[in-house]
Image (cartoon, rainbow, N blue to C red):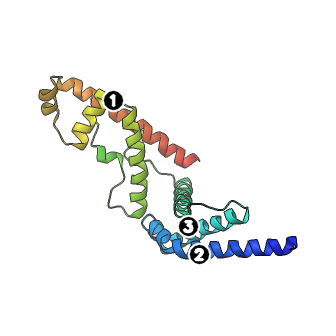
Amino acid sequence: MSAALTHRLTAAAQDREIAATVQRERGRLLAFIRRRIADAAEAEDVLQEALFELVLAYRTLQPVQQARAWLTRVARNRIIDRFRRRSRERPADPPAAAGEELDDGADDGAFEDLLPAPDGGPESAFIRELLLEEIEAALGELPREQREVFVAHELDGVSFRELSARSGVSVNTLLARKRYAVLHLRQRLRAAWDDWLLT
C-alpha cells in the first residue's frame, strides 16, 4: 500500500471520528456555553472555536482521548479570553470597590459584596463561579481562627456576640480576625481580576 493511500485512509478515519465527536458533543457543549454567554451569535462563535481546535488537534496527530472534558475546557478558556478582551476594551473595577483600602474603622461589608450579583446574567454568573473558586482557595490559605470566624459570620450568619459566647474570645478579637480574612480575600480577588485582565 502506498504512503499516499495510507495517508488518505488515515485522514478519512480521522474525519469520521471528528464528525462523530462533533455530532455527539455539539448540543451539550453549546448548552454549556449558552449558560455563560447570553448572546446566541457569540455563543455559536465560541462553539465553532472549540470545534475548530478539536479538528486541529486531530490534524496535528494529537487525538483527544476524552473529548467531552477537553472541549469543555477549551470552551471555558475561550469564554475567559472573551471576558479579558472585553475588560481591556472597557476597563472596569473588579467586583466590590476595587482598590479601596479599608481604614481602621471601616465596615468590611458583606461577603456577597465581593461577588457579582447572582441574577446578573450568564456572564456575571460565570465570573461569580470563577471568583468563588478563588475565594475557596483563599479561605484555605487563612489561619484557622480567621477562617472559622469568616465562615461562621459570613456564610453561616452567626453574630459576633454569639461567636464570642461560644468561643470565649472577645468580640473585638473576632472582628479583627474577620477583617484580616476579608482583606486577604480582597487581595486574592484583586490579584485574580488583574491576572484575568493582563493574561
53 on left or right of 175: right
Label 2, label 3: how many angstroms apart (C-alpha)?
Answer: 19 Å
Sequence-first tag of 1 and 2? 2
Q: Is residue 62 above or below residue 138?
A: below
| Nearer to the camera, 120 or 97 | 120
Q: Name the element at disc 2.
A: helix
- The amino acid marked with disc number 1 is Tyr
- Label 1: how many Cα within 10 Å (few below 14, some 14–19, many 20+): some
Q: In this figure, which residue is indicated by the disc labeled 3?
A: 46
In this rendering, the label closer to the viewer, 2 or 3: 2
Note whether residue 107 is visible: no
The amino acid marked with disc number 2 is Ala
Left or right of 96? Residue 28 is right
Percent position of residue 144, x then y: 31, 28
Q: Nearer the viewer, residue 25 or 184?
A: 25
Name the residue carrying label 1: 180
Residues at circles 3 and 1 in contact by the CB criterion of under 8 Å = no
Label 2 environment density (alpha carbons within 10 Å; few <14, some 14–19, many ≥20): few
Q: Which mark identifies residue 108?
A: none
> What is the spatial separation of the Cα atoms under label 1 and label 2, in whole angstroms?
53 Å
Q: Give the residue displayed 86% in from the left and 70% down from the top.
A: 3
In the image, taking residue 126 as reference, residue 164 lies left or right, namely: left
- Give me the C-alpha separation between circle 3 and circle 1: 40 Å
Asked where in the image residue 104 lies, by quadrant, the reply is top left
Image vertical order of residue 69 relative to residue 144, above or below: below
Report the residue marked by disc 2: 20
CB-based contact (under 8 Å), mark 1 and mark 2 = no
Look at discs 3 and 1 and give the one toward the viewer.
3
